[in-house]
Image (cartoon, coloured by chain):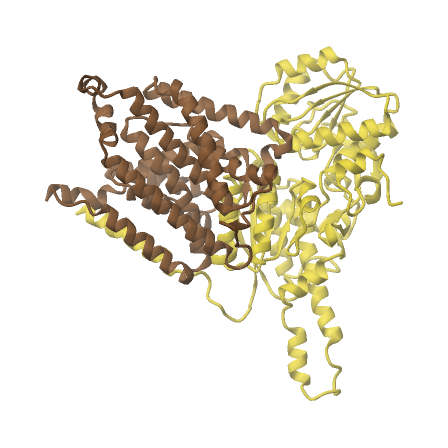
Amino acid sequence: MTRDRTVLALLVVVAVLLAAGPFLPRWMISLFNVSMGYGIVVLGMMLLMRTGLVSFGHGLYYCLGAYAAGMIDQIWNVSDMLAMIGGGIVVTAVVSTILGFLLSKYREIFFAMLSLAFSMILYGLLVKSASLGSTDGFNVAAKTLAGMDITGKGLRLTVYSVTVVVMGIAALLLHRYLASHRGRLAGAIRDNELRVEYMGASVRATVHVNYVISAVLAGIGGALMAINIGHIDPEMTYWPQSGEFVFIAILSGTASVFAPLGGALVFETVRSFAYEYSPNTWQMVLGITMLVVMIFLPGGLWSLFTRKKVAA
Amino acid sequence: MLRSILRSAVVCCSLLASLSTGALAAQKTSVKVGFVTFLSGPAAGPFGVPAKLAAEAIVDSLNRGEAPAPYQIKGFGGLPIELVIVDEAGGASKQVAEFRTLVQRQDVDLVIGYIGSGDCLAVAPIAEEVKRLTVLFDCGTPRIFEEGSYKYVFRTRPHATMDAVAAALYLRDTHPTARRIAGINQNYAYGQDSWNDFEASIKALNPDVDIVTSQMPKFGAGQYGSEISALFAARPDVIHSSLWGGDLEAFMLQAQPRNLFRKSTLVLVAGEPYLHRLPGKIPDGTIVGARGTNGVYAPDSPLKKWLVDIYKTRADGLAPNYPAYSVAEAFLGVKAAWEKAIGKKIGSAIPMGAAKNVKEEMDKAYAPPTQDEVIAAFEHSTFESPSGKVQMSLGNGHQAVTGTAYGATHFVDGVVKVEKIRYYKADEVTPPAGVKSLDWIRSGFKRGN
């Protein structure tokens, strides 16, 4: 077995991205910000998929994270970036812990549909709340970072740097978790739950923990997206958004924590250029990309970079 | 083999993406306009695609210098207009990303677009951040300039409060005995705002009215059986509705056979684009609005004739609907400001023979105006459009006001005609500067002190 170089690679990637930040064209910074926001959510999807679960309702936590970030400004006038991300983490952790008691009992299509149902309940509630702008949503602006004023010219770069660091930390922690005792149970649960129980491990507890972790990751992604986009609306918990996360997760593959991040970047880049070059058929471009990947690379884009090594 | 080809393809694409840095800076030979409208989704059919057709027709005609006075100069101040069309589908977060792409990668000179109010709200602060002139052409929410203040953002059509207030005024003028009022509006921001503004207006005009029911089916519901029953049971004199698109058509098809409108007058705030689709299915006497003096309410003028002619040749003989008129307002507003800015520069240039650098000064004066010069000329401007005169008077000169009109349908010889048209002036139906719409309505439409 070769030594795991993921941690080192991750640190190098974060360092390179941070160093490159000031030299990147502005549109790339915003492309990165959006991709990494998605990427962090898809990290959570990856963990669930490794556990054998597909959630069609992760928009719930993505949206909760974003609204938590936006509403601490509305309610307590707090517009510190770290506090906003913290708000997203707390809210999604609490909600997912509660829902997890129910959801961890279900598998396959029942899990997918139940999670979808919860996300659509939030959608319904938000659409009915006129004080939060109903379907129009409201604008969000981060003004400080740990107390320092970040408004003005460097705002985007600051958001970018924070996003890169948060992404790095999230990927690192998830990678460590996946390598841990409980983390390794995920694959075992997907393969055979009965055996896991016979081994003496609790399937339900593991599913519950993995669900909470993936929800918190989605919350962080949502909070970052709220800060980056500057506007939030109930569309974030509408089912096509959740579907998009599943889409990116399948596109990426689940072999490494790099996969969701790279996959999100590829997805956003393809989408962005498809919007630009084929405004009437951009959906088709995305669909064909997906088909090609599914037919030729059933393990996702990441399998391009791994399978050879495994064979060797 | 295939694997390595695919791998190199992915790597190459990422490299290409990181290397292409948008348009190269060069001598200005055209004005690049990003145009954002729904090309897919439910709003594409009634609004998005008509807007796109109108934009293409208008740009084409302006570039050939065929528009009537005062817009006979080619393009914007002589420079041809180049359109970059983008789909508005996908929600506000994607639109923010695409807006950045338009400005930072495609380097458009200005952006005209946005039908969804959520998209407008989301894009406005970004336009301010990237400092690029952005003209909102169709979205309705008054929140944009009532909750924010922008330098680079303009909206060349009046906001949706006007539609509700004018509908209430029209009812007062034509149906003074109507007491029992009901509503059916979609449960999303525009539907809720439309109903709230209308309810407040009708109560401000006549405190005795009775709101008997407000039905809020979800957006895209398609089935209105229970809502129609509820409306029946409430026995309203008037039914207010801001339904549009497939929802409106489905509601009409289901309500008509049940004779819902025999005793209740229907008010369709945004009904005008559907008149040609509903002959025989829209009861006589239905009050329809066009969100401004657009379409059938547009006053006859060479500009209206121009728009109708160029649009019909693009749209297989179909007349332009109100989104098409809104697009014309946006393009002509920018054109007027652009050319006014040039005029201002020429006017203030050094007179011939008075100084040494005459040639340089004159070159400068005749050069395309800078963005700041266009914005300065745009603020508080007044310009002519196919829908009549547009005044940029709210939101520190960034939000347009126009008059509006309502009329009642009459079905003759297989065509739906609109009769009993009443026009309302801008200051009868829009709040004064600095006052929020709902506060203004609740104050009983007070103007100044």
Q: Position of residue B429 (x, y in %)?
A: 81, 39
Q: Nearer the viewer, residue B60 or B268?
A: B268
Q: Residue at x 27, y 40 (%)?
A: A175
User: As drawn, is A262 to the left or to the right of B127?
Assistant: left
Q: Position of residue A129 (x, y in %)?
A: 61, 28
User: As drawn, is A293 to the left or to the right of B28?
Assistant: left
Q: Residue at x 55, y 69 (%)?
A: B28
Q: How many marks?
A: 0
Residue A54 appears in the picture as rendered: no
Q: Residue at x 67, y 65 (%)?
A: B373
Q: Nearer the viewer, residue B223 or A10?
A: A10
Q: Position of residue B2 (x, y in %)?
A: 20, 46
The chain assigned the colour brown in the figure is A
Which colour denotes chain B?
Answer: yellow
Residue B119 appears in the picture as rendered: yes
Residue at the extreme front = A147
Quadrant in the picture for the C terminus of chain B = top right
